[in-house]
Amino acid sequence: MTTIDRRAILRGLAGLGATAVLPDSIKQALAIPAAGGTGTIEDVKHIVVLMQENRSFDHYFGTLRGVRGFSDPRAVKLYGSGNSVFQQPNVNSQGVPQMPNTIMPFHPTEANLGQQFLTGLPHGWSDAHAAWNQGHNDRWVPAKGKSTMAYLQRADIPFYYALADAFTICDAYHCSIMASTDPNRYYLWSGWCGQNGTLPGGINTTNTGSTPGVIPLNTSGGNAGNGTAPNGPVVNNAEAGYGWTTYPERLQNAGISWKIYQDIGHGLDAGGSWGWDSKNPYIGNYGDNSLLYFNQYRTAQPGSPLYDKARTGTNMLNGGAFGNGTFFDQLKNDVMNNTLPQVSWIAAPEAYSEHSNWPTSYGMWYIQNVLNALTSNPAVWASTVFIICFDENDGFFDHIVAPTAPMSPAQGQSTVSTANELYPGAGTNASYVAGPYGLGARVPMLVISPWSKGGWVNSQTFDHTSIIRFIEKRFGVIEPNITPWRRAVCGDLTTTLDFSMSNAAAARLPSTTALAAPQADIVAGKKYATYVPALPANQVMPVQEPGQRLARALPYELQVDWQPLPGNATFSVTFSNTGKAGAWLHVRTANGTALATSASATGPWGYTVENGKSLSDTWTAPANGSYDLAVHGPNGFYRAFAGSVEAAAAKLVGRTLYDPIGGGLSLVVTNAGTAATVVTVTDRYTNATSHQTVAPGGSYRSDWSLQTTGRWYDLAVTASTDPRFFAQFAGHVETGADGVSDPLL
């Protein structure tokens, strides 16, 4: 393998889209340096968040170069079959196999796929938990339908791929809850979905609409009134009227300016002011300003901050006729006049929201115009971070198993409190199955800023609360609703930016002018029948675009140590976190061989380990003594151990030693058995091997520089005396320096 040249990657990025058309104003704005000053997050003056609707990461970016998509070399294997997670079982709701037996991701054949009204899929609490299936991640087809496996690629959504090539994409950003739109947006705007109980920060005061505290019970299950919330958490789109404190209220109290940019459509609904009534899907905000489901905003009067900042907007239908300005006038005026608030959120009309059954092309057109407005004043853009994310995945498949808090010891352990992360399946929402709130599936996330230019990937685990935490980091306004578990597992987005950069070459972006909705459709408010793609006759696993991507430095440093204990036919594993951030480790049987903790025979299991801490668990091997365990962590971290606890079996244990300065790695394999064996270590990136006879009680250390792989490693260990023994160590060595994406992607 040839040495990775970071400059070569940059040259390749500069050539992407070189013939595309880009408005001169955008070229100029992208070419200017980031605002100078402190060289820290303090230089950020404006944070703008645009949350779109209902797409998964694999659905949009599974084929993008250099992200953890369809070519993931360490994708989980399904229990029982041992198949890749990309081979989803095609079974009916009763679990009966159908033909074909499995369904893989497929690209629909319809022309101009980005402009199709692709069918919508189930995307509520029950079907999301069914697809997740206790972490097995193997019931997407019966829960969501065959179209769950449909995906788009660069030719379908060129503007998004160009944004990723120009700025920074996050390939470990998850929606916050395995549920529908509204609960996910409550996490965006308040850090939680309104569970009963004491707030995570320990505050325990009465909630009167603006004071954080205990949410009172409401046995009626309807609108509780007086600033209280309905009984139990909000896990659906009931929009009944809520009263816990939202993050914009905290910003207001702290003197931080904020605003919601939207179109007012037909105004608030007369039945209770519970959202914008968009009789025409090309106007309004599609109800995606979820602050309007809170009583304190519904009852706000003109002249009050909650009214003026959350219940006003453009009026595209002024006087009943179109043509009265654009959706982007107020935003552009604020940018041009240097009155853009410190924190802003944008809610698009239904037709431009990218909700499945609306074209992605319309959404790209909308976002291009938002970007035009934000860059209309280069001095403002120089200090702005523009975040594009999606509220949930609709029913579209994603292969990464989402981090979740364990419901019980049968599902794992956590060094941090899991309070307010577990739904018991009781109260007025008893019809909803018990389970963790989240995280949910990965969704697209792009960070567009002068500090994020260059075509980067960031693989730290994030969710919607990460956006609040980024605002916390910049403006110091704390959101006590965010749980300790979520703060441990999810980052604060600061690793997506490089505040030391002077400037980076600006990539050209394709024009979206031709993607706008037809004017006749807008005037008529026309909707179209949805397109339901057909399964291909011959299924072929998709591959990603070739090449690597620049990768941001991450705060992870993890160890997993195992020890077979033949005396009592058990197998112990210790999870240690010596990094700077918490991590969630997903453990499963790799080929269907049953194992058992004290409470679960088949798993999967999840282990949350805060930085500086460790925890252990013990598995009991089945009657034949065999074990086969795989551990998946963030950014491709992987450990696999297979063998037997029988007396005659090889008993090798291994541990990695990281070089945090040079970026290399040493693997130490110790023979804990009673017979000598030849230990062979194979580098799966380069096919280089090393081997040595190791006596009982002895150790063999092999050193790997990792210079040719960009600090990525994938080492396999075998033993000459036991063909059943196998161990694998894979991941990335972090040094605090930026790097490149996994060469195997």
Image (cartoon, helix red, strand yellow):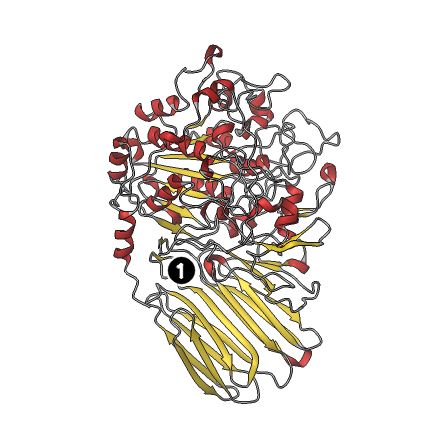
Q: Nearer the viewer, residue 371 or 426?
A: 371
Please say whether residue 476 is visible from this viewpoint: no
Residue 206 image position (x, y, % from top left): 64, 32
Residue to which mark 1 is pinned: 742
Q: Nearer the viewer, residue 67 or 329?
A: 67
- In the figure, 283 relative to 676: above or below? above
The quadrant of the picture occupied by the N terminus is bottom left
| Crowd tier of the residue under label 1, counting other residues whose Cα lies within 10 Å: few below 14, some 14–19, many 20 or above | many
In percent of the image, x 38 and y 44: which residue is there? 161
- The secondary element bearing badge 1 is classed as loop
The quadrant of the picture occupied by the C terminus is bottom left
Furthest-front residue in view? Answer: 537
Can you tell which quarter of the image residue 556 is in?
Answer: bottom left
Say left or right for 483 vs 23: right
Residue 561 image position (x, y, % from top left): 53, 71
Furthest-top residue in view? Answer: 319
Please say whether residue 676 is visible from this viewpoint: yes
In percent of the image, x 71 and y 38: which residue is there? 429
Can you tell which quarter of the image residue 602 is in?
Answer: bottom right
